[in-house]
Amino acid sequence: LVVSDAMAAVTADEAWLQAMLDAEAALAWAEEAAGVVPAGTAGRIAAACRAERFDPAELGRQARAGGNPVIPLVAALTRAVGGDAGGWVHWGATSQDILDTAQMLVSVRALSVIDRALTDLAAACAAQAEAHRRTLMAGRTLLQQALPVTFGLCAAGWLTGVVGARAGLRAAGSALPAQLGGAAGTLASLGDHGPAVVAAFADHLGLAEPVLPWHTARQPVAALAAALGVVAGTAAKVSGDVALLMQTELAEVSEPAEPGRGGSSTLPHKRNPVAAAAVGSAARQATALVPVLLGALVAEHQRPVGAWQAEWEPLSRLLALAGSAGEQTAMTVAGLEVHVGAMRANLDRTGGLLLAERVTLALAVRTDDGTPVGRPAARSAVEHACRSALASGRDLADALADDPLAGRLLPAAQIRELLDPVGYLGSTDVWIDRALAAHAASDGVAPGLAIADPPAAVAVAGAQA
Amino acid sequence: LVVSDAMAAVTADEAWLQAMLDAEAALAWAEEAAGVVPAGTAGRIAAACRAERFDPAELGRQARAGGNPVIPLVAALTRAVGGDAGGWVHWGATSQDILDTAQMLVSVRALSVIDRALTDLAAACAAQAEAHRRTLMAGRTLLQQALPVTFGLCAAGWLTGVVGARAGLRAAGSALPAQLGGAAGTLASLGDHGPAVVAAFADHLGLAEPVLPWHTARQPVAALAAALGVVAGTAAKVSGDVALLMQTELAEVSEPAEPGRGGSSTLPHKRNPVAAAAVGSAARQATALVPVLLGALVAEHQRPVGAWQAEWEPLSRLLALAGSAGEQTAMTVAGLEVHVGAMRANLDRTGGLLLAERVTLALAVRTDDGTPVGRPAARSAVEHACRSALASGRDLADALADDPLAGRLLPAAQIRELLDPVGYLGSTDVWIDRALAAHAASDGVAPGLAIADPPAAVAVAGAQA
Amino acid sequence: LVVSDAMAAVTADEAWLQAMLDAEAALAWAEEAAGVVPAGTAGRIAAACRAERFDPAELGRQARAGGNPVIPLVAALTRAVGGDAGGWVHWGATSQDILDTAQMLVSVRALSVIDRALTDLAAACAAQAEAHRRTLMAGRTLLQQALPVTFGLCAAGWLTGVVGARAGLRAAGSALPAQLGGAAGTLASLGDHGPAVVAAFADHLGLAEPVLPWHTARQPVAALAAALGVVAGTAAKVSGDVALLMQTELAEVSEPAEPGRGGSSTLPHKRNPVAAAAVGSAARQATALVPVLLGALVAEHQRPVGAWQAEWEPLSRLLALAGSAGEQTAMTVAGLEVHVGAMRANLDRTGGLLLAERVTLALAVRTDDGTPVGRPAARSAVEHACRSALASGRDLADALADDPLAGRLLPAAQIRELLDPVGYLGSTDVWIDRALAAHAASDGVAPGLAIADPPAAVAVAGAQA
Amino acid sequence: LVVSDAMAAVTADEAWLQAMLDAEAALAWAEEAAGVVPAGTAGRIAAACRAERFDPAELGRQARAGGNPVIPLVAALTRAVGGDAGGWVHWGATSQDILDTAQMLVSVRALSVIDRALTDLAAACAAQAEAHRRTLMAGRTLLQQALPVTFGLCAAGWLTGVVGARAGLRAAGSALPAQLGGAAGTLASLGDHGPAVVAAFADHLGLAEPVLPWHTARQPVAALAAALGVVAGTAAKVSGDVALLMQTELAEVSEPAEPGRGGSSTLPHKRNPVAAAAVGSAARQATALVPVLLGALVAEHQRPVGAWQAEWEPLSRLLALAGSAGEQTAMTVAGLEVHVGAMRANLDRTGGLLLAERVTLALAVRTDDGTPVGRPAARSAVEHACRSALASGRDLADALADDPLAGRLLPAAQIRELLDPVGYLGSTDVWIDRALAAHAASDGVAPGLAIADPPAAVAVAGAQA
């Protein structure tokens, strides 16, 4: 339920199947270029490497006997190619070469979609930060109103997080390597041709050329998983704030209205934060999958029993969950209804208490009979006035006026001014400017990650740019 | 038990306390430079900012009332500074400013130790890769002997993983930001001085200057945690391989011998892989902590209830665990006893079966009556010979000689040559060269991360270089 | 910071040390009874088994060489006992026997404290359920007001969860077994005396007698860890609700006021949900440790490399975290300030919208010109009235009066009655009664778990009752 | 790839859909019995509640708008029922009532399959324990040979773990409750009929009657998830041992041979532990999902945003993974090839070193010139002899004969006898007997869990027996 159609498509069984076939085709091209297989072979193999010619469900069933789907796929592909060329299918490779390469292709293609979602999300946050630069609201710490902020500053904070998460994902996804090492990583089956074939293979697929076969050096996969976990958590921070701000008693924002969306099955008046619920669900699941991929680093010898086999479905699902979380959150922020009046009303609800810090600081630098008041005395006086205001239901201004210290040293007009939140926003404008500038400098479109429409054919633009 | 003295020291309560005091001192210096606090204040505050003047256990107890240790620390520091200067302690900051900054200082200082351990580990792997470039051993996949490799290639694989994990850690640790935002991130308490004070504050501490306060944009922390998880898993891969190779029946390596180390309490003859056990334990614990830090991304509003408070101990422990795992593994690899004879004996134990792939490939390209044999027929013949050899206990050479197809097309001398593992190492030498070159290019010492001796004073060289 | 003094004490290094010594003493007693060691030996050994005679930090350092603390402890204890008796220390046991048994003793003693906390928490929830049985408040789903409930029903829901979590913990902790198997589980070192010694050993310690040595059958530990995870999550549900209800805009409850508690370092007027933050932090950390213990089930052969060694600190910390979460939440609920007026005011804030479901159901069973209205038409009419009320700011009663269908079929008086929440509480009273009855039936004090004051001496009442 | 056909079927979208329809039908029956809906309604609704009449994929798509699949399902079911009866579909229920009840039905049905797998696995372990009660093999700790054991004892250890895991699962699954509370848990929509309808609803479905609605008291789900995690880990312990024992150098067991199973895509001679790889993969994934379900305990107010929505897919997958792990391991153990000769050969490989402990104990109780030798001196002598044997490649018997102390006090014949592993099995037979007895007492078939063939219709025998 939480995975979008787009993310489901790029991580589906069919996408994996096509990626495996792309790897087999690229292997043939690379081997033909190196003279390992006869001229003309690669074209015949590549022609058969189309997912729609194979049945993923059937391959999945057959995969159980050998523990991976490449074994039955190679058999089926050999039959599909037929003739002499068929005999050269999968030449010199091991199952893991194909599956790891496919995993990287699926990742690169999914990352293209995810990057676009994050780019949309960042743009939406930037737009809200600019539009609501001066929209006053209560800043809340530990769920208590603390100090005035603006909704633009909130959005700028979201923006910085999204830009950071996207940068981490781009770094993790920018050089995903092809895999080709043969049964134990030596590529002995290719004699002296190993390095040349690997280079051509990777180049053909738009993947990075690895230093050496990484059958049990899984840092690229683990780092990618971690970056996806950060993306999911980043989305959930934003959508979680939206859900909190949508609470009936706050009503400061609403998720975008769509016909039929967010309704309750029994309560006609409700409008639920359904995107937040979906994103929260996705992030919880995504976060939990990261340790599976970290655990897969501990891969015995040249190929492990269990660790590697635990990568496929979790990574595929991590991609789907993180991407869907990003997409949903982008839609939420882009179409967010911001209730400016409610924000201001909530801010005013505490009768000035949120400005207590400001009064404290102003009082602290006053002098009383030539002695500076100092922070401890100022704080004590203001705390007393706050408690008095809370107890009596009066505004803080009145309580301060009655306070022996504050009432004496701070004129009523200054108290009024001190309690106006507009004047107590500190560096808010600067922070927003800086967040927008950092976003602009991060360039909205990632070169290399957003070129091709996934799932694309063999020659998809890779992650190396 | 699994945390080393060095890592315990840089993550201990005292290290955190000093880091918080360093933050308070740097705040005073930055505010004095900006004219926020009177000249002469910072010197007096800084003079009191020495951990040995405070009692971490007592502060910890007092911390419970307010939910963080900064509240009692500020009170104690104010008393320790005394006079007018005491009133300016913590001016304009919120608890999270100090605690987040301290967390980054503790991290930077711990990362320096961890980086050194990884650098040692990489150097040890590189040395083993070079020394055992030609040391034949069985490559093992799914715990079954698969093809010949060399121990140097194993070590080159370890090396590549370590260099990758270290690069990820450096990237995550290279720009850890200072935190300064005041109660809700606006720095309203500093009026117009906010940006200048933040810049000076970060500069003083050698931390990066943040775009804006990141009280609830925790990507730097989450990414650091993830990178530490990768480090721990990388160490556990290496030490896990050592433990497997130390099995009584393989006996191909031993952890370094030290007096009293690895002994059993009841079995006088045993030598246990105690480093591997410690590293395995550390990696399991480290991996599990990563989702706590990913979960902390979902931080409500301007400061969360629970998420932020769940960062401190897990991050501190992650640093300790990952660093200890790196150190132990570095010692293991540096002093590893490599039993070359046992490696060769184990490789020979299967009577040539490991070269079956090679025979298959050689047979496949033969022609029989003018027709190429092809891979399917070759594989079928060799599989048959293997089964026959296994069943009869004979060497594969003999079984192949008796095979109708292989025996006819492959002369006995060629079979002998094909079954010599020395000739079937493929690109092993190239891979080792490339791994060593990549390691050399990654420069053993990380500038900026390895300059100061942690835990250092306020002016520690930061993570920005 | 999140671990209480009580939980810290029962899980401290000293508590582990005493538990190991208790195991060594019990072993001597059991072996003396079976005639395995000379009469008089056990008394001499037991006399030396006092934690204050040993230095846990020094033992910890020495433990690294052998990978566990039992090796140096046995050496130190042998010296402390001296003479002939010293030679019989640890007779026939392996390190894991002592450490596993100590782990179970530490657990049993900690469980006694945790059980008391949960019992207090359950009692506090029951008291609130009874006291606020009729205290109206808004039920909230997806953070939106949904239907009226009472605060007593909320508390009854908490109560049911706490009773369930406590039952799970009692089940997991009720038969924690002693461990005694010797180096590989055969107890070969004790000849024919094995079973008798195991029985006496377990009996002496108040632990369950195991079916066979469970060195690598870790189900008791894994199940205990899981139950502790449930406890921590259960506490966090309650304290999380409190934090949400404490929001400035809701202000329906407050954590108990204590001097200096919940204050902010900079905001004099705030009262933070500090217990909720601590419990939330504890639960996040506790939840993450559970998979470490589940992963330890996969323990190789007769003793694993890494899995077992990853149990000690995580289990000890899980006990501390879960217990502290329970204690804090018990204090929160017992002393909770319930703001009945705010609850009612918030419920009334939506002008009757929360009763829309009730109106729908009443309208659906009306007949219009002899035809039943039915739910779809009723829902459509009420939804329309809700939207109209929301848009115009009017009460739902007025909007319904204007509705062509509802206004015609429902008289104004009935509408008023339908919109009174007091009459729409359904089975609330029954549920509260049932929750209280189930709590009463679960008997507040767990026999066997709450008898002794931990950490107690060897003869502590065990978990078997 | 790791999920079996059987487990896939009982956790598939279709199984969930039928379970939701079963819940809707049972609701109608219960309400008709209570007189809430007109006589004759339930029959018409129940007749339409057949999964094949609905399209799960389409419902899934529509589910996104409201955040759960019940909203579109109710609409579709209302249309399918039609007429007056259609208007009574879902009467008084909330989406979560149906989804939670369906989740419990899916669980009960899946648990029936899982229980059968565990029962098969236990029976297979018991058979191996009996058959190989005297089959000598090396006991291994930290992957080092330690002491002689028998393969029967290994299998008895597995058996005890499996019986324990199954007991935990039965406890967690034995009283899974139905859910019915309406929008906020009060069942206000049913007036006074709530308790009666809930009782009839649960009874109709064979689920337990809850104390009160448990929309946010998720202990039953969390405990079930934890028990499934224990099951998966238990299976992985067994299959992991099999993979280790299958290592080329040990070759003590083989996974059952099936045509085409366990083959490598390139290495004709290999037979891979493919079941162990699948089970290991499943257990890693299952373990990681447990914290998601524990985290879902922290469910806000009367229905959470994200926590509940994160239960469905993880729990469904946990059921599938744990069950598949159990099934695969049952097949592995039932058909395991045990290579008795290899076990003995490996045990003899160390030339008696494994009996060193026995010699130590025998030597310790000797007297030398009237003084007992004592354990320290004995251990020192035997350690010396072990090192001498290892260094020289001689048998331990010879090295002991040359030792000044051992050679003098132990005659050669006694040394020979001491070094015969047959005589040093301690309580092995007793442990096996006890494990078999405990298994027998646990009765192979769980009443109530194994009656019906899942997925069954509404009246499936529930989990209450």
Image (cartoon, coloured by chain):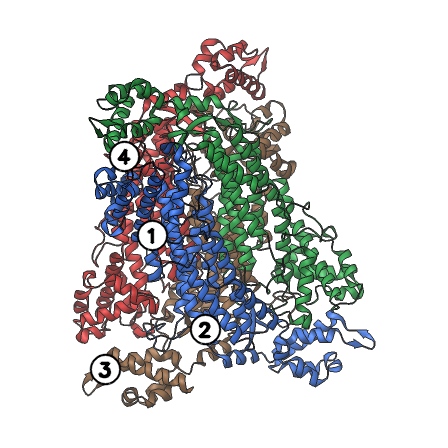
Chain colours: A red, B brown, C green, D blue
**Residue type at tag 2:** Met
Q: Residues within 10 Å of mark 3 (few under 14, many from 20)?
A: many
Q: What secondary structure is marked by label 3?
A: loop
Disc 4: which residue: A334
* Figure check: C202 above or below C227: below
Tell me the CA gap for discs 3 and 4: 63 Å
Q: What secondary structure is marked by label 1?
A: helix
Q: Chain of mark 4?
A: A
Q: Please identify, in this view, whether the residue under mark 4 or under mark 1 is nearer the observer.
A: 1
Q: Residues within 10 Å of mark 4 (few under 14, many from 20)?
A: many
In the picture, measured across the screen, residue A280 lies left or right of residue A28, that is right
- Where residue A271 appears, as percent x and y from the top left, is 31, 32
Tell me the CA gap for discs 4 and 2: 57 Å
Tell me the CA gap for discs 3 and 2: 33 Å
**Residue type at tag 3:** Val
Task: Decide which of tag 4 and tag 1 comes sooner along the chain.
Answer: 1
- Where residue A133 appears, as percent x and y from the top left, is 33, 26
Disc 2: which residue: D246
Q: Chain of mark 2?
A: D
Disc 3: which residue: B373
Q: Chain of mark 3?
A: B
Disc 1: which residue: A317
Towards the viewer: D160 or A359: D160
**Residue type at tag 4:** Ala
- Where residue A348 appears, as percent x and y from the top left, is 41, 19
